Each structure stands twice: as structure tokens, then as C-alpha cells.
Image: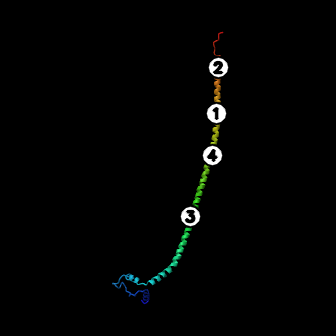
Amino acid sequence: MSLAEPLDVKAGLQPRPLSDPVLDSNANSPDEGLIEDFTVIDKKAVEQLTEGLISHYVPDLQRSKLALKELTQNQEVLLETLQQEISKFKECNSVLYINELFSEAKYYHNKLVNIRKEMMMLHEKTSKLKKRALKLQQKRQKEELEREQQREKELEREKRLTARPAKRT
């Protein structure tokens, strides 16, 4: 009790006799009297204790704050790097897609070239067939004209061969 007594005197507290609550049936709760003890505490002592406590923990808290700030900056850099890598992967996928489109375009271009060749060949054939049809039509018309002329000649000949009454003189 001699050790506790000088501390209590410095803090402005009065020493109290120790009592065992188990043995003392009339004992009050352990929190009783604490409010009274706080009111008699010296404000200068409280300020000094607060300053001591703050000076003890502030450097560690500041170091922690700097470490957290650095960690946050590193995370931001890492996030940016990750975003760049993601965009690179997206570019790679788009390049693959573009390559696929180019190969598909090449396939359809070849198909178009083949269709164009076939169309040109068909155009040539139709032109030749039109010319041939025109020649055949002209030949048929010529033959019909010749037949018509032949028929006219035969009719003319029959008319000449037909008996005519003789003229009286």
C-alpha cells in the first residue's frame, strides 16, 4: 500500500482502504466511486498523460499512414498496369478476329472472282448464241423469201401455162 499511496497523492486521489467484495457483503460494485475519482483528477496531469500517449503513438501512426499511402499508390500503379495488360489481351483477341475476317474476306473474294469469271464466260456464250440465232433467223428469212419467190415464179409459170382464150383478129 505504500507504493500505491504516493501515486494516488500525485494524481490527486485519496487512498482508500482495500476491502474484499466477497468477504464484505455490504460492498458496493467495483465501478462505484469511479466517477468521483475522475472529477478530482488534475487537468494538467491529464494533458501531460494525453501528450505522452499521443507522442508515443503518433510516430507509429504517421509511419503507418505513409506506408498505407505508398501501398495505395502501388496498388493504383498495379491497377493501371493490369488495365493495360487487359487492353493488350483485348487487342490480341481483336487481332485474331481481324485475321479471321481477312481470311473470310479472302475466301469470299476468291469466290467472287470465280463467279465473275463464270459470268464473263456465260456472257461470251450468250453473245455467241445470240449471233448464231440471228444468223439462223436471217438464213430462215432468206430461205422463206426464196421459197416465196419460187412460189411466185411457179404461180407465174402456171399462169402462163394456163390456157387463154385466143384473141380474135
Q: Residues within 10 Å of mark 4 (few under 14, many from 20)?
A: few
Do the residues bearing badges 1 and 2 touch, measured as CB atoms within 8 Å? no
Give how far across and how far down residue 168 sits, in percent: 65, 10
Q: Earlier in the sequence, mark 1 or mark 2?
A: 1
User: What amino acid type is highlighted by mark number 4?
Assistant: Asn
* On-image quarter of the N terminus: bottom left
Residue nearest the observer in this picture, 79 or 21: 79
Q: Percent x, y for residue 24?
A: 34, 85
For residue 114, the mark is 4
| Percent coordinates x, y for residue 111 in the rendering | 61, 47
Q: Are marks 4 and 3 in contact (CB under 8 Å)?
A: no
Please give the label number shown on residue 156: 2
Q: Secondary structure at mark 3?
A: helix
At x 51% / y 78%, what residue is drawn? 58
**Distance from Cα at disc 2 to Cα at disc 3:** 105 Å
The three-letter code of the residue at mark 2 reads Glu
Sequence-first tag of 4 and 3: 3
Q: Is residue 69 above or below residue 32?
A: above
Q: Amino acid at mark 1?
A: Leu
Secondary structure at numbered mark 4: helix
Q: Residue furthest right?
A: 169
Query: Residue 36, located in which quarter of the rendered image?
Result: bottom left
Residue receiving disc 1: 134
**Considering only order in the chain, which callout, 4 or 2, is on the residue closer to the N terminus?**
4
**Which sits earlier in the primary sequence, circle 4 or circle 1?**
4
Please identify, in this view, whether the residue under mark 2 or under mark 4 is nearer the observer. Answer: 2
Q: Residue furthest bottom?
A: 2
Locate residue 8: give its quadrant. bottom left
The quadrant of the rendering that contains the C terminus is: top right
Q: Which mark is residue 83?
A: 3
Report how far apart the C-alphas of labels 2 and 4 lie in the structure. 62 Å
